[in-house]
Image (tube, rainbow, N blue to C red):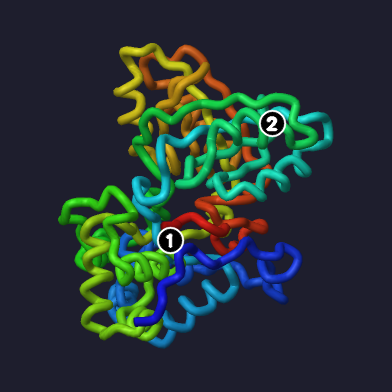
Amino acid sequence: MAPVKAAVTASTPDRNTSSVPPHEPPPMDQTDLDIVAALQIAPRVPANALADILGEPASTITRRLKRLQQDRLMKVIGRFAWPLVTSGNPRQLWFKCQPGQALEVAEKLRGFREIQFLLVTSGSADIYADLYPLHGSDINELLSRSVPSIPGVASIESQLVLESKRVGHSWRLDRLKPEQVAALEVHRVPVNKPPMTSIDELSDIEFGTLLQLGQNARVTAAEVARSLNISSSSAYRTIQLLLNNGSISPRVEMEPAAAGFTLHAIISLQVKPKFIAAALENLSVKKSARMVSMVTGKASIIYHGTFRGPDELAHFITDEIGALSGIQSIDTCVGLNVLRRYWMDRDGELMGDQVEGLLTR
């Protein structure tokens, strides 16, 4: 058997070259958006089945899938189960920077592999970041010395995430017909086996397969078999095991702005304690929700949302949040530039590779 690498080998791309294609990618049309919406429901649906469900020729679907990925507008990656990559709950960090230093500070933050999400904002903070305690990281050192010592940082507010009611891969374009959604659901791989709780539980073959699914969640058993020098049947069984026990969850990554959701807002809500649970449940089912968390600190709930513009955000704040009980205060920061989402560096609507070293053993 070929040796299995001990860590994700993809490095952070050179943002001046490899992260930007040599041409301006064409905008996503209705067929592109239908493909993305379908993959959000069933990320591993075969191309031929996807073509039948969308009513398009198989050659068109195959060509579009290839172009969307080559133009860095979409990737189907794997979300590792948190116990396999982290040692505790994430932190949400709010930065205030010296005047004119926000972009420089944000670029420095890109150097930390623990930063999962990175956003330059306008509002009460200049930068927002999600920091995850990856195995091998010293979070106390990061929060007390390494991150605060970045030139240009004026202050940092850190909030511990206590509970996440919704995570990013749950966001949907919601543009397909009910019968199409039902047909796609058949191709979802169920999570129906006991979860693995430690990376040490994985065999070499399972670990190698997990790495490949993390980079490309549509990887085939034949591709895994060639890479690891095992039989296709062994590769297929390993892929199914990792999907069935939730070690890896396929997810579609794209920048919402490419689909017309050009405004990203992070809304901090201070909620009376007895109303927190109900507010979390209510907010977690909103179509605009990308992440909804209960946190420590001044706010009780942090809501990440994507909107088509200021009018849609205004309606959400006044009508939907306004209808919730127990809201004591609200603070909204609007995103100016997403620099990283789920450990993938961004350049506008274009995506690079995952940062290095998420999964190690």
* Residue 131, x across and y down, in percent: 53, 39
Residue 148 marker: 2
Camera-side residue of 118 and 183: 118
Furthest-right residue in this view: 100
Q: Which tag, 1 or 2, sits closer to the chain's start?
A: 2
Determine the residue positioned at 54% across, 38% down: 138
Q: Position of residue 55 (x, y in %)?
A: 33, 77
Q: Indicate left or right for 121 with 267 as reference.
A: right
The amino acid at mark 2 is Pro
Query: Which residue type carries mark 1?
Result: Val
Q: Residues within 10 Å of mark 1 (few under 14, many from 20)?
A: many
Mark-to-mark CA distance, 1 and 2: 33 Å
State whether residue 300 is above or below residue 249. Answer: above
Q: Position of residue 12 (x, y in %)?
A: 63, 61
- Residue 331 pos. (x, y %): 57, 23
As helix, strand or loop, the secondary structure at mark 1 comes to: strand
Q: Quadrant of residue 44?
A: bottom left
Marker count (numbered): 2
As drawn, 184 above or below 144: below
Q: Quadrant of the N terminus?
A: bottom left
Residue 179 seen: no
User: The C terminus is located in which quarter?
Assistant: bottom left
Mark 1 sits on what residue? 252
| Quarter location, residue 360 | bottom left
Q: Residue at x 39, y 81 (%)?
A: 2
Q: Is residue 329 above or below residue 290?
A: above
Left or right? Give the position of 128 relative to 30. Answer: right
Compared across the picture, whether 35 is left or right of 66 comes to left
Residue at image point 32% right, 60% down:
41
- Badge 2 marks a residue whose secondary structure is loop
